Structure formats: C-alpha cells, structure tokens
Image (spheres, grey):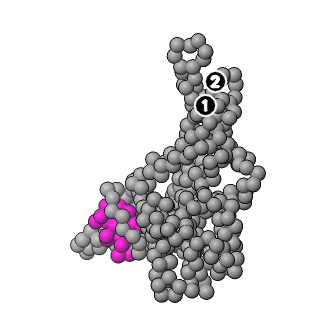
Amino acid sequence: MIDVLPERAEDLYFVYLLVDRGDVVRGWTVREYKPEGAKEGERIKVYLAVRVEALEYHKFRGSLRVRGTVVEVEGDLEGVKGRRHTFDVLPGREIEIAKPESYPMELVDEVAKLASVALPRILLVSIDGDEAAVAHITALGVELLGVLENRRPKEAGSDSEEEALGPFFREAAKAVDQYRVRLRPDRVVLAGPQLYVEMAARYIKGDLAPQSSGGLAGVYEFQRGGHFEAYREILGSEALGEVLRLASERPELVAVGLDTVREAAAQGRVRMFAVVDEALKERAEEYAEVLRLVFSARGAVRIVPAEGEAGQMLTAMGGCAAVLRY
C-alpha cells in the first residue's frame, strides 16, 4: 500500500508515474447518488476505491483523473459498487494506491528521487529596478530564497538609469553566484521587464525571460506562464541532442535501448540516462533496476515527455538511451 499526499500541482506528475492500470486507488471523492425511490440525485462526498482502467494527466491544467470501476464503497450506498467512476486526484487530498504483490516497491523510492533530480532545477532571478527576488524552482514547487530591495540612492554623476542601477545589479549578482554554487541548478533564468533583464544580464549570466513584472510579483508570473514545462522540454531535447551528437562522433559512448543501457549501468558507465515517461510506466520493474544502478553510480537522469519531439524520437530508439563515461 502506498499513501500519497500531493501538495502541489507539480506533484501530480509523480503520482501519475506511480499509478498503473489494474491498481486500486482509494480516497475521498464526489459522486452523484440517487437513492432508490428518489426523483433526483445529489452530489455527495464518499470514500471509495476504483480499479484503474485509464489515466488522464493534463500537465498544463495541473490535473490527474483516474477512471475505473468501483470495487469498494464506504457506507450504505446501494448500486454504486461495480459502476464506473472518475476519480480526481487533487493537491491536498490524500489517496492510497494498492498494487499487485509483484510490483517492485523500490520504484516508489526511485520516483521520489526523480522528483528532486530528474526534472529541471531552475534558479530564477526575478528583477526590475526596485527589487530582485531569487527562487529555486523544481518539480516539487517553488522555494523563495530571498528578496533584495534596491535602497541605494542614485549615484552622484551618473547620467543613465543603467549606471544608477549598477551597484544594485552587482549586489544581486553576488547573491546569485552563492546560490548557484550551493544549488547547482540546470538553468539560471532572468525574468522581468525586458529593459531590466537586459541590463541585469550584463552582471548575471543566465537565460532571459522577459515578462511584465519583476521582483516577487515576477516569481508568481513566471510560475503561471508555463515556463517550467518549457524548460523541461528544452532539457529533454538537449539530452537527446547529446546522444545524437555522440552517436555520430563517438558511438562507443552511447547506449540505446533498455538492454544495452542496463548492461552499461551495471558497469557504472552511465553518465546521463534519458528515458521517455511513458516507457518508464510501461516497464516499471525493468526501469526500476536501471534507475537504481544509474543513481548508485551518480549518473544524471532525464525524464523526457513522450508528446514532445524529443520524446517521439527517443521512443523510436526503444524508449531510452544513455551517454556513457567510457
């Protein structure tokens, strides 16, 4: 039995990786119920269990729906068991996942590890002329690291806004460098009004993401804009690009397909492992073994979305590929 409490919309992706067809999912849900003899039904909150037949995960809406047949129902609700039901998995609502005895429960630990290392880690610097907010964004959510206010008076003799903001940007750059060393993000992203991010880029190295606001408000705007998913696809494409480049230049440093990757992982040779999310679900037990080997040898993992161009190409290559150390 796996108890899961998704806290944020991002967590639903990892619940999606854990739930498979044939599992039994239990939890509180809302269902329309019409007692015998009643003229109209009513929507009631009920604790029930469904045997999973289909999953619908919508990453941009942040929703996960489990469809299946009701196998258990709490209380005296006649006529519910055996019927079909759609179970909405929501942040803040705990569920239980019952799996077959043959399921490799170690995969639960691996998915938890993937939540922290397999998807992009972004150090976001949301900046304008008055404030710089630094946040660490991962698949598990957003951690606000600090907010720096520009309290410096305009420098005597400065004749442009850029000169006046120089000390503020240098102070922000110093803080960003400290976070960069400690957190080792995949990307540093400068977000805010275009004028300010272009000026700040002279002091802080990173990708530019112009948007309407900077500072703390800009952090929330970046979250709502779907930028995290965009970076996830970018990193998936970069992982595949590295595989293709080495396949052409040094094919001995590339392993393609699960069996070949497993052999290399057993020897501790995998430096970077790219796997399509759907392949990870479909062959959970076999991938669990490979993931353990990659993690134990301090290899990197990239989960690539199946619907993207990189995911489609990787699927055609057998669902996974790896870059080897030697």
Q: Is residue 204 left or right of residue 276?
A: left
Q: Residues within 10 Å of mark 2 (few under 14, many from 20)?
A: few
Q: Which residue is mark 2?
A: 79
Assign a secondary structure to mark 1: loop
Assign a secondary structure to mark 2: loop
Q: Give how far across and how far down residue 113 sits, in percent.
A: 64, 62
Q: Which residue is mark 1?
A: 83
Asked if residue 123 shows in the view, the reply is: no
Q: Give how far across and how far down residue 146 sits, in percent.
A: 50, 61
Q: Is residue 138 left or right of residue 22?
A: left
Q: Residues within 10 Å of mark 1 (few under 14, many from 20)?
A: few
Do labels 2 and 1 touch, CB within 8 Å? yes
- Start-end of magenta stretch: 186-203
Examine the rendered structure and indicate whether residue 79 appears above or below residue 270. Answer: above
Q: Amino acid at mark 1?
A: Arg
Q: Is residue 127 magenta?
A: no
Q: Amino acid at mark 2?
A: Gly
Q: Which mark is residue 243?
A: none
